Image (tube, rainbow, N blue to C red):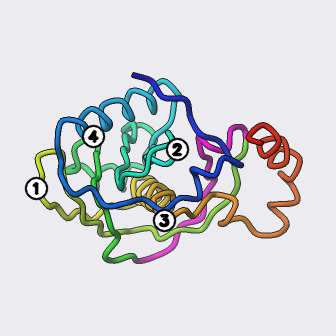
Amino acid sequence: MIYPIVTYGNEALRAKSTPVADINEEIRKLAEDMLETMYASHGVGLASEQVGRSESICVIDIPPDAEKEECREANAAVEMPLVLINPQIIAAEGEQRDEEGCLSFPQISVQVTRANQVTASFSTLKGERKTITVYGLLARAIQHELDHLDSVLLVDRMNPVQKMAVSGKLKRLQRQNR
């Protein structure tokens, strides 16, 4: 099932996620539907709040050709797509600044500074706790999706000049969600 994507101005995006207590068939179906929704929307990541849900779950799938070669090699052991349940970042290093967009902010992208390397811990669909260390775009995507789970949005990462530059688009999105 493909969900409609919740866009900026919808209060669901400002809700903090709730931990998943039981990885059951409903959670597996949610993950499957979120992946289908992400692919249909041509995204590389999606958090539950973006489809109006509150479970602490996000999905990510970075196409190999989207990642810089050195990061692609470093991230090679990480199987895509990634389904992260109750994820947390336990370490972050370095810095990268790059263009970042969001399915909940259609036609808006801005330069955002993030850690270049993150170590994340999460549960898999099988209920196993896993820890991975990733770099580059995959590290950026994990940070972005975990922001959503903590109710931090792309607009919150913008500086005042960036907000002014996209203010018309932000107001349009807010009007659409009244």
Give the spatial CA distance, label 1 vs label 3.
22 Å
Q: Which residue is mark 2?
A: 50
Give the spatial CA distance, label 1 vs label 4.
16 Å
User: In the rendered structure, are the residues bearing label 2 and label 1 in contact, judged by CB atoms less than 8 Å apart?
Assistant: no
The amino acid marked with disc number 4 is: Met
Q: Which residue is mark 3?
A: 150
**Residue 141 part of the magenta-drawn span:** no
4 left or right of 178 in image = left
The amino acid marked with disc number 3 is: Asp
Instruction: Return the x and y of residue 83 as percentages of the image width and height.
Output: 28, 46
Q: Which residue is mark 1?
A: 128
Q: 135 or 26: which is nearer to us?
A: 26
Instruction: Return the x and y of residue 9 as percentages of the image width and height.
Output: 71, 49
Who comes first in sequence, dot 2 or dot 1? 2
At mark 1, the secondary structure is loop
Give the spatial CA distance, label 4 vs label 2.
20 Å
Identify the mark at residue 80; answer none if there is no mark: 4
Give the spatial CA distance, label 2 vs label 3.
12 Å
- Of badges 4 and 2, the one in the foreground is 2
Q: Residue at x 53, y 67 (%)?
A: 96
Who comes first in sequence, dot 2 or dot 3? 2
Who comes first in sequence, dot 1 or dot 4? 4
Who comes first in sequence, dot 1 or dot 3? 1
**Residue 84 higher or lower than 118, as above or below:** above
139 left or right of 30 in image = right
**Residue 95 part of the magenta-drawn span:** yes
At mark 3, the secondary structure is loop
Region rendered in magenta: 93-107
Instruction: Estimate how packed mark 4 is, as few (under 14), some (14 to 19) or many (20 or more) residues with alpha carbons within 10 Å.
Output: few
